Amino acid sequence: MVAARNQEKLSELVQQIEASGGRASAFAVDVADEDQIKTVFKAALGQFGKIDILINNAGITRDQLVMRMKRADWDAVLNTNLTSAYLCIQQVIGPMLKQRWGRIINVTSVFGQMGQAGQANYAASKAGLIGLTMAIAREVGSRNITCNAVAPGFIETAMTSRFSDDFRQNALKAIPLGRVGTPEDVANAVAFLGSEEASYITGHVLSVNGGMLMG
């Protein structure tokens, strides 16, 4: 199941998956809305019968210095980036416990690990995902369910395309590999954590940042 707000992009993704021999269904949902989340997961479970892997990948920014940041911008980012992950996990945890197998993968950020000026809300939400990941990993590990996080660095996406050239150049100087990451770099890390090869990894934050942050 693929779920997001943009129905057009969802339809394109379903076509790509089916063209490569897979099966997919699109569910339009705003993960900031708890009722929509419950409706979508109920429909997905009804269609597929089970959910083996959950990837929490929703993320927005509302950047501003903290002294000027509006409460609405703080709430919007925390609701979409962090609270939505908790709500989605609640919807799959019962079925995963019953089948005694599951993979939960939260997409956090390097800025949740090191902070970023002008992104107090974003950094807090992504740091919160790391804490959530570790807590869930401890709660459900005995039932063969893992919960891990992927922490991308500077990745070429629609979100980062808005950054100025000066910001991009400064960012590149801080990346030992000397390049911006690709969505495929992140997807490969997510695929690994969802596989049997990663069955003995849980509560871990896998950094995909070209060396921007080490340790």
Image (cartoon, grey):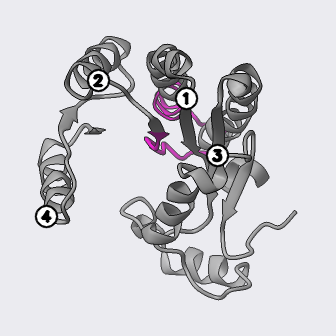
**Of the residues shown, which amino acid type is indicated by label 4?**
Ala
Front residue of 3 and 79: 3
Q: Which residue is mark 3?
A: 149
Front residue of 175 and 205: 205
Q: Which residue is mark 4?
A: 19
Q: Is residue 88 left or right of residue 103?
A: left
Q: Is residue 63 above or below residue 136?
A: below
Mark earlier in primary sequence (3, 4): 4
> Which label was assigned to residue 49?
2
**CA gap, disc 2 and disc 3:** 25 Å
Mark earlier in primary sequence (1, 4): 4
- Please state, as top left, top right, bottom left or bottom right, where the N terminus lies in the image: top left
Mark earlier in primary sequence (1, 2): 2
What secondary structure is marked by label 1?
Answer: helix
What secondary structure is marked by label 4?
Answer: helix
Magenta-highlighted residues: 55-81
